[in-house]
Amino acid sequence: MRMRKKRNLIPRMERCQSVWIQEPEALKGRWEKMLKTAPVHVELGCGKGKFTARLAEQNPNILLVAVERVPEALVIAMERVIQSELSNVFFISEDVAKLSEFFEAHEIQRIYINFCDPWPGNRHAKRRLTSEPFLRIYDPLLQVGGQIHFKTDNRPLFDFSKEEMERYGYTITELSYDLHANGPVGDMTDYEEKFWNQGIPICRLVATKEKDQNK
Ligand SMILES: C[S@@+](CC[C@H](N)C(=O)[O-])C[C@H]1O[C@@H](n2cnc3c(N)ncnc32)[C@H](O)[C@@H]1O
């Protein structure tokens, strides 16, 4: 996400200390304790956090951890959840590639990836958050029976991601090529709302981890 530099970014970030986890390594293996044994759900690349806030609000029983590497977007997401007075969502200002530094094996029940950057062309395919090198990072952290929930407007990215997940050993348990064909379904992200308003079909899948791969 390319965003204009915000001059008052640092004081705004500092005002979000209650939801901003600045040393996520220290919570490795202990996340669920933050909310008394709540299942841990992780959103990768949360952007400005519309989905993050809605999901947390509607599921007070989960602990939602959102990861975003662009502070200009992250600060908006953090301000949103503070304004909504949510107590079950926290943020990590880091690259998703470092996820295994923050979570223990089998610590995560569900991963959300929404409208990740498509990185068109084969040369940059490995940078897609749904590519095999990233699945290798997520997989050991996911519980058996855990899921990856993925949405995008980009059909080539969707087809690529489905294939990568199946090849990795995941079972596709939900699949839609036009999620909102009969009216809005579920919590929309900032990007999703924009595309939906333009009449662009949204693709969604759920990939379920049936067993440990030990790859
Ligand atoms: C296209 S935006 C989508 C934002 C949001 N999920 C939505 O649907 O509105 C992709 C987001 O993922 C973030 N992102 C991309 N790669 C990332 C990475 N490796 N680590 C952390 N965040 C990443 C970007 O900074 C950006 O905010």
Image: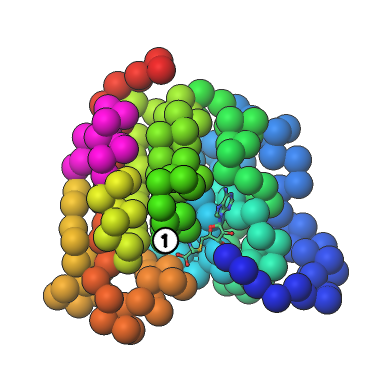
Q: Quadrant of residue 211?
A: top left
- Within 10 Å of disc 1 (Cα), the crowding (few <14, some 14-19, many 20+) is many
Q: Which residue is located at x 38 percent, y 71 percent?
A: 192
Residue 171, horizontal then vertical, whole percent? 22, 35
Q: Is residue 139 left or right of residue 101?
A: left
Residue 124, horizontal then vertical, whole percent? 48, 47
Question: Seen from this angle, which residue lies furthest bottom?
Answer: 197
For residue 164: magenta? yes
Q: Is residue 138 visible from the viewing direction of this image?
A: no
Could you say whether the residue bearing mark 1 is in a helix, strand or loop?
Answer: loop
> At label 1, which amino acid type do we have?
Phe
Q: Which residue is located at x 19 percent, y 61 percent?
A: 177
Q: Is residue 30 left or right of residue 208?
A: right
Q: Is mark 1 within 8 Å of ligand 1?
A: yes
Q: Is residue 123 left or right of residue 204?
A: right
Q: Which residue is located at x 36 percent, y 67 percent?
A: 187
Q: Is residue 57 above or below residue 127?
A: below
Q: Is residue 127 above or below residue 49?
A: above
Q: Which residue is mark 1?
A: 115
For residue 18: magenta? no
| Residue range (magenta) | 162-173
Residue 110, horizontal then vertical, whole percent? 40, 42
Please identify the quadrant where the N terminus is shown.
bottom right
Residue 168, horizontal then vertical, whole percent? 31, 29
Q: Is residue 161 above or below residue 68?
A: above
Q: Is residue 137 visible from the viewing direction of this image?
A: yes
Residue in front for this viewpoint, 100 or 87 = 100
Q: Which residue is located at x 32 percent, y 66 percent?
A: 153
